[in-house]
Image (cartoon, grey):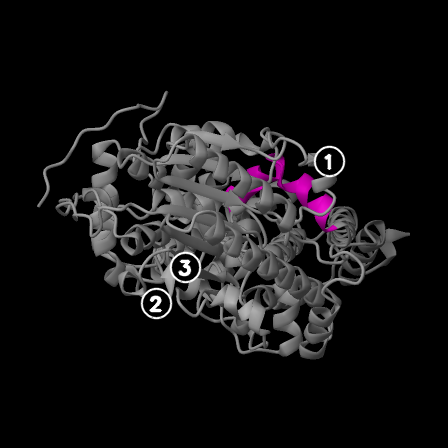
Amino acid sequence: MAWIFSAPARRQAVTIVEFRSHPATLNHMTLPLILLAAIGVILLAERSARHLPFAIAALSLCAAAISFIVGDFDRAILLAGLLTAAIAAASTIKHNYSALKLVVTDLPLMFAGTARFFVAQYPRAVLSALAGTAVLVLAAIGTLIHGTGPSIPLDVRVSFLSVSLICVAAAFRKSGGGTSFQRIMAQRRCFYSTFMASLIDPHSWRQAGRLALSDIASDPLPLMPPVPARTFDYPDIVVIQHESIFDPRIYGLPIEPTVEAFLSPRNGLHGILNVDIFGGGSWQSEFSLLTGLSSASFGSRAYHLFKQGAGRFHNSLPHALSALGYRTMLASSCRRSFLHYDAFYRSIGMHDRLFADDFPPPFDVSQFETTNSDATFLKAAFAAHAKGIADDPAPRFLYALTNFNHGPHNRRLAAPGHFESERSFAASSLPDDQYVEYYTRLAETASTWERLKSELATNFPKRPVIIVHYGDHQPVMAKRIERQLTLPDDARRAFRTFYAIETLNIPPDQLVSGPGANLDIAFLGTVALQQAGLPLDPIFATRASLLDHCRETYFASPSERKRRFHRTLVNLGVIDTAPGAPRSRYARMPTK
């Protein structure tokens, strides 16, 4: 019967048969709609026009690569759009819990304990992420099975890939390269382009393979001459890292007098401390304080610094104090097996290392870990400190790591009937259960500290002491505060905590007191030495000279002097970046 049709009719019949034999084949209007959908996904992922050309070029490159698998542009663009949505969603989740966006070197961290920690601490977020992943996977499968479009010749796909590569390279260069994306890591925009930039940035891959600084110059900086001591009576130095504590006034929330005396002691130096992390990773703040370096300088290696950095940092706060005759001691609220702490702290000069499972009775580690109470832990830490003084009158350095205010904040840790007025005060300031719990724990810590400080002054009335305490990072709960108060955008707010430096048995005129400048945590150890009136070796003296160059931003500072200082430290072997086993000695560079 086919021969009775005219030629146009036969062609129409063939077209109908072909269409019916492929019922899922897309019509001629589908590709424009797919393109519009993909652009919509990009706009939602970027929320900014600044890096939009690079984001669109990167999506085109993904679609071009996928087209070699599926053979058509319809499914390739759809799948590239789904991939963009997946990256943006994952980056948004990471930003909510770390205040930093997703980069490609974060992916290996999923197998380094991060995933287990996240599941244990935030199960609801994990379930939501798994549900979203399932939806995207089903959408991808549906696209592969039912979204077949017209087949594209191989030479056209090769041309599309080539043009996309050129566009990506040009847009990446025009946007400022990898450095421009590093500067906006904390900003809530450019979720897709930031990840794609990290994927093609050669520096991110170099950092992933070895211990290397990102902010380092080619030419070294001559070291400053050493600074002499201002006192012959070296004070004890006590540094307390308060887990997940920040000043509520950063968010415009009021505090009570006891908490104010803790955060801003009247006769001490105090201010805002800028740290590299949000929500977790306390060891990165510990690293920065003790080495005078930013953990962020080491990129994805920052998470592994305690493992991969053991034996590679040869000038630290404990090293400097040991050279002055100090006895150094770590008191950690974690167990000895936690995250290579013992090996790292030994390598940077911490002579005595006490962990939660080392403290003698009446300290009970199993009971302590039900609440991680500061009252229990700090009492044991100061008892060990006092015993050390009795055994050896030499000046002492105590570094105490607490864990009381760690999240989540959805359960009460204070004993019933205790700190109820503080709980009510917090609820009147912000009716959020998690903030109320945070503030109550903060009030208990402030009360504990006031009592311990009084006992220390009573037990050692003639022994001079410098006390530094600070917050290592904000807890994840802080994001709830920001959302509820609808505060203006400030990407750095999530990285602000507090520092306070007090003294016992030291004349007031020997200490700078009152509100101090905002500091980066990399400078806090140097400022503590200055406040104590201790001598500074050439490295610490040079670091002190960077205060006016960097101040509250060490890693983010564009200071060329800082970058040259890093080159000096590497050239001297003070930072050992050589492959293989770390070296144990370093040479001295002539001072300026």
Q: Quadrant of residue 415?
A: bottom right
**Disc 3 and disc 1: Cα gap in Å?**
33 Å
Asked whether the beta carbons under mark 2 and mark 1 sit within 8 Å of each other, the answer is no
Return the x and y of residue 461 as percentages of the image width and height.
42, 51
Q: Secondary structure at mark 1?
A: helix
Kindly identify the residue that appears in the image at 62 percent across and 30 percent down: 360
Front residue of this view, candidates 78 and 521 = 521
Q: CA distance from mark 3 to mark 2?
A: 8 Å
Instruction: Describe residue 111's horizontal placement relative to residue 517 as left or right.
Output: right
Determine whether, in the image, residue 255 is placed left or right of residue 322.
Answer: right
Q: Which residue is mark 3?
A: 502
Work out whether 363 lies above or below 270.
above
Chain part drawn in magenta: 104-122
- The answer to whether the residues at label 3 and label 2 have Cβ atoms under 8 Å apart is no
Give the amino acid type for the residue marked by disc 3 in the picture: Glu
Q: Please name the amino acid that badge 1 sits on.
A: Ser
Kind of residue sitting beneath label 2: Ser
What residue sits right under mark 2 in the picture?
513
Q: Is residue 177 above or below residue 218?
A: below
Q: Tell which circle, 2 or 1, labels the residue nearer the N-terminal end.
A: 1
Q: Is-magenta flag for residue 530?
A: no
- Name the residue tied to disc 1: 366
Q: Residue furthest right?
A: 1
Of residues 545 and 569, the one drawn nearer to the viewer in this rendering = 545
Q: CA distance from mark 2 to mark 1?
A: 40 Å
Front label number (3 vs 1): 3
